[in-house]
Image: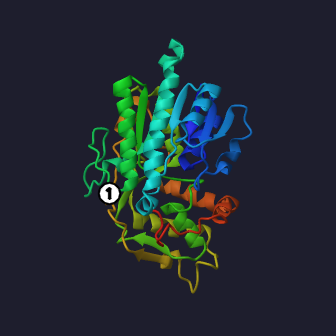
């Protein structure tokens, strides 16, 4: 099978490509614009490969998209290309509207036109997999309840609103044109190759540099954490075994408050990097660096996924607990300084646009 992966140089997209090339005989066409968060070195460990091709293209460029479809003749699309950082969407929502909504429309339009001219056997096997987020569901508020595939949309940020819009477009193409789609909505991802402005890598790298560990508000916001390699397995399950027209929620069963996440990282670093002169002094640990900062506008209190549908129908469960996954993640950042140092040497300097707070999705 030939799979066109949009956003394949991003955090989740690169994990998907690594999974496919390491574990299957499928071919991958990686379509990525290579914006600030795109990094081809994130897939270097599985290259070179005769099953891989790369196209540097903006999903908003319809003519370029048409050429890719005609040249590579994909059997399926996994659409992961998106602007994804909530803080950036607050500071500059226009890019999110353009990429997440207009870009998804352009991709749907080109993919449908391509699909309609396929021979019947190939046409009936074609799938367009749209990868989305649990943030489209809004805020669960208290400690009870979970997001299900039937939860009504109630997005809070420009980011989540743009993703909700793209989800609606995908469903409309299925309902109106019979275009074969599946949608997945995932909880917060973490793991290797994560761009350093997101919460977990931001905290790890700030701690190693002895810089403040910023936490929004009182740190009691709850997120369900999903190890990115578990997510990649789930996404491949969906595109190969999922039912057309269905939505599958993907979660890690790991609800943690943001303050718990930061404290856990500090504890692991005190074990694995106990002699770091930048962070430790006078016998005090990494937790002394924790700093509470002004909360983000419209900050949702709690997200939590009910992943029972994908578990029952597609036999997928996460392999990593939060404890095992976060330890693997910290170890990866300790052992792969060359990767993240190359990122930091660019325009990103461990600060989000216009504030000191780390990304806390």
Tell me if residue 249 can be seen: no
Task: Give how far across and how far down residue 74 sits, in percent.
Answer: 58, 26
Q: Is residue 208 above or below residue 116?
A: below
Task: Give how far across and how far down residue 357 sits, in percent.
Answer: 46, 70
Q: How is the image coloured?
A: rainbow
Q: Is residue 220 above or below residue 122?
A: below
Residue 256 is drawn in which quadrant?
Answer: bottom left
Task: Give how far across and how far down residue 235 sits, in percent.
Answer: 49, 37
Secondary element type, mark 1:
loop
Tell me if residue 315 can be seen: yes
Residue shown at 42% from the left, 25% from the top: 179
Residue 7 is drawn in which quadrant?
Answer: top right
Closer to the camera in the image, 13 or 90: 90
Can you identify the residue that label 1 sits on? 302
Closer to the camera in the image, 160 or 271: 160
Task: Give how far across and how far down residue 339 sits, in percent.
Answer: 67, 58
Residue 8 is drawn in which quadrant?
Answer: top right
Total tally of numbered discs in the picture: 1
Closer to the camera in the image, 95 or 295: 95
What is the residue that sits farthest to the top in this orientation? 120
Residue shown at 37% from the left, 74% from the top: 294
Q: Quadrant of the N terminus?
A: top right
How crowded pointer 1 is (Cα within 10 Å; few <14, some 14-19, many 20+) is rated as many
Residue shown at 70% from the left, 46% from the top: 44
């Amino acid at each position: 099978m030939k799979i066109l992966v949009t956003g394949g140089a991003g955090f989740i997209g690169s994990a998907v490509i690594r999974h496919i090339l390491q574990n299957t005989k499928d071919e991958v066409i990686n379509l990525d614009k290579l914006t600030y968060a795109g990094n081809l070195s994130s897939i270097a460990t599985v290259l070179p490969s005769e099953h891989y091709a790369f196209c540097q293209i903006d999903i908003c460029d319809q003519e370029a998209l048409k050429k890719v479809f005609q040249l590579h003749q994909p059997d399926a699309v996994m659409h992961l290309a998106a602007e994804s950082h909530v803080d950036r969407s607050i500071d500059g929502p226009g890019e999110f509207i353009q990429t997440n909504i207009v870009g998804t429309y352009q991709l749907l339009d080109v993919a449908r036109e391509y699909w309609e001219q396929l021979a019947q056997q190939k046409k009936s096997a074609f799938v367009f997999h749209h990868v989305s987020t649990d943030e489209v569901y809004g805020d669960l508020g208290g400690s009870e309840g979970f997001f299900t595939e039937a939860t009504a949309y109630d997005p809070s940020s420009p980011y989540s609103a743009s993703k909700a819009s793209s989800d609606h477009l995908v469903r409309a193409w299925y309902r109106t044109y019979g275009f074969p789609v599946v949608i997945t909505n995932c909880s917060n991802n973490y793991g290797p190759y994560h761009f350093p402005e997101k919460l977990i890598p931001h905290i790890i790298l700030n701690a190693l540099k002895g810089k403040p560990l910023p936490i929004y508000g009182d740190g009691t916001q709850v997120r369900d954490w999903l190890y990115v390699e578990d997510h990649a397995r789930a996404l491949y399950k969906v595109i190969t075994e999922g039912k057309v027209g269905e939505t599958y929620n993907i979660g890690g069963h790991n609800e943690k408050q943001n303050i718990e996440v930061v404290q856990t990282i500090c504890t692991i670093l005190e074990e694995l990097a106990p002699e770091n002169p930048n962070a430790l002094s006078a016998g005090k640990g990494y937790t002394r660096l924790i700093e509470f900062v002004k909360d983000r506008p419209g900050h949702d209190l709690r997200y939590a996924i009910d992943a029972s549908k994908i578990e029952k129908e597609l036999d997928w469960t996460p392999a990593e607990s939060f404890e095992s996954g976060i330890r693997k993640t910290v170890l990866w950042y300790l052992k792969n300084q060359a990767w993240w140092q190359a990122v930091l040497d660019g325009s990103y300097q461990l600060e989000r646009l216009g504030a000191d707070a780390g990304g806390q999705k």
